[in-house]
Image: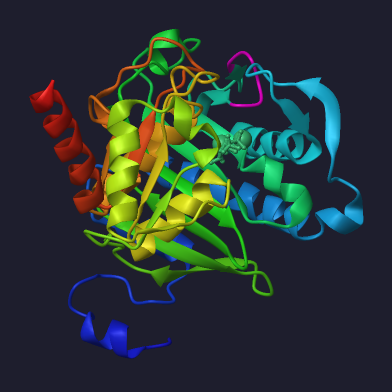
Amino acid sequence: MIYTEKSKANLDTFTSPVGIAVDRFIAKRQSEFPHATGDLSQLLRDIVIASKIISREINRAGLSGIEGMTEDENIQGEPQRMLDVIAEYRFKKALMNGQQVCAILSEESDDIIETGNHDGKYVVAIDPLDGSSNVDVNVSVGTIFSIYKRVSPQGEPFTKEDFLQPGTAQVAAGYILYGSSTMLVYTTGCGVNGFTYEPSLGEYFLSHPNITQPEDGEYYSVNERDKDEFSRDVKTYLYELKAKKKGTRYVGSLVCDFHRNLLKGGVYLYPATEKYTKGKLRLMYECHALAFITEQAKGRATNGDIRIMDIKPTEYHERTPIIVGSKGLVDEFEDVQKLISFKK
Ligand SMILES: O=P(O)(O)OC[C@H]1O[C@](O)(COP(=O)(O)O)[C@@H](O)[C@@H]1O
Ligand SMILES: [Mg+2]
Ligand SMILES: [Mg+2]
């Protein structure tokens, strides 16, 4: 067991020492809930298994020729990359074999994927490969997932209502970052923990216990390509951030930008633009999950009007504007809005 100064100091604040394997961590957390059945734990393990395979595929993508495009487009009209399809296939297989999930909503499939497990208690919404435009250039990419308890009776086919639930109904959410190291970060509503993958041992170990997002940060992440199209609120807010000498960091992989801001402080924005009148990012398999994580880490997430977690979707692949990150920086956006509406 590796005890750093930090973990020695915080020994009494968290129940699991740095370095505990993710399987043990999941089991320990489950044991803290006397009525837990183990189904959610098993589902989390299924996601962990698939992510290990994808991490290997991504690491050697340049050698195995699985970089590059397919001839297909997804429902968003975006060209599908080989790795988008492979990542979806791996998660689908793992969740089907795991038998905890009755249906899957994926960015890469127009319709809901039925797993055939009618007894499955959960549904999963997943962005199998986030930031896929960065795969070919060896920049970090990710996977984002949200887990909901179904509202329809077990034993029967899933219903639309099983998916169209507000973010507050999530039982767990997380992401995997395939970067200089592969990391899993997730929450089940009791704080946020990060695990680093050790490929030679084939295991994730707790490396970032009880993540808390700093109240403020030095960076903001936004694609300024469309800045002339942003609303007055957003333009004024960006002007304020620049005036305060905040720097920009924009990788173009949401998981990557989000992760940096989660650990170091900062804010990520994808506002509405002329092309994306409702923002580009998808509510159910990008924004709900990251909003749950950021709130559990004391950050905030809004669509500019309401809390992302309170939005109840009406469509599977619906988009939303998003401003997510350090509490102080999101509060500042709302202060700008109040000022503008006051001046009107
Ligand atoms: O190129 P843009 O318009 O800035 O968009 C980049 C954003 O789009 C995304 O790539 C969308 O996600 P996918 O790659 O999963 O489609 C985000 O990861 C990223 O933050
Ligand atoms: Mg994405
Ligand atoms: Mg994607």
The quadrant in which the C terminus is found is: top left
Applied colour scheme = rainbow
Q: Is residue 304 left or right of residue 194?
A: left
Q: Main secondary structure of the magenta part?
A: loop
Q: Is residue 338 above or below residue 179?
A: above
Q: Is residue 339 above or below residue 42?
A: above
Q: Is residue 125 above or below residue 66?
A: above
Q: Nearer the viewer, residue 73 or 332?
A: 332
Q: Position of residue 131 (x, y in %)?
A: 62, 43
Which region of the structure is painted magenta? 107-112
Does residue 32 appear anywhere in the picture?
yes
The quadrant in which the N terminus is found is: bottom left
Q: Nearer the viewer, residue 138 or 13?
A: 138
Q: Residue at x 29, y 21 (%)?
A: 311
Q: Position of residue 26 (x, y in %)?
A: 39, 57
- Residue at far left of view: 342
Any magenta on residue 287? no
Q: Residue at x 19, y 31 (%)?
A: 337
Any magenta on residue 110? yes
Q: Residue at x 60, y 26 (%)?
A: 107
Q: Is residue 289 left or right of residue 133?
A: left
Q: Residue 12's quadrant in the figure?
A: bottom left
Q: Position of residue 92 (x, y in %)?
A: 65, 32
Q: Is residue 130 left or right of residue 18?
A: right
On the rendering, which quadrant does ligand 2 occupy? top right
Q: Is residue 144 above or below residue 72?
A: below
Q: Position of residue 316 (x, y in %)?
A: 49, 16
Q: Nearer the viewer, residue 172 or 101?
A: 172
For the image shown, how many numbered marks are present on the structure?
Answer: 0
Does residue 30 appear anywhere in the picture?
no
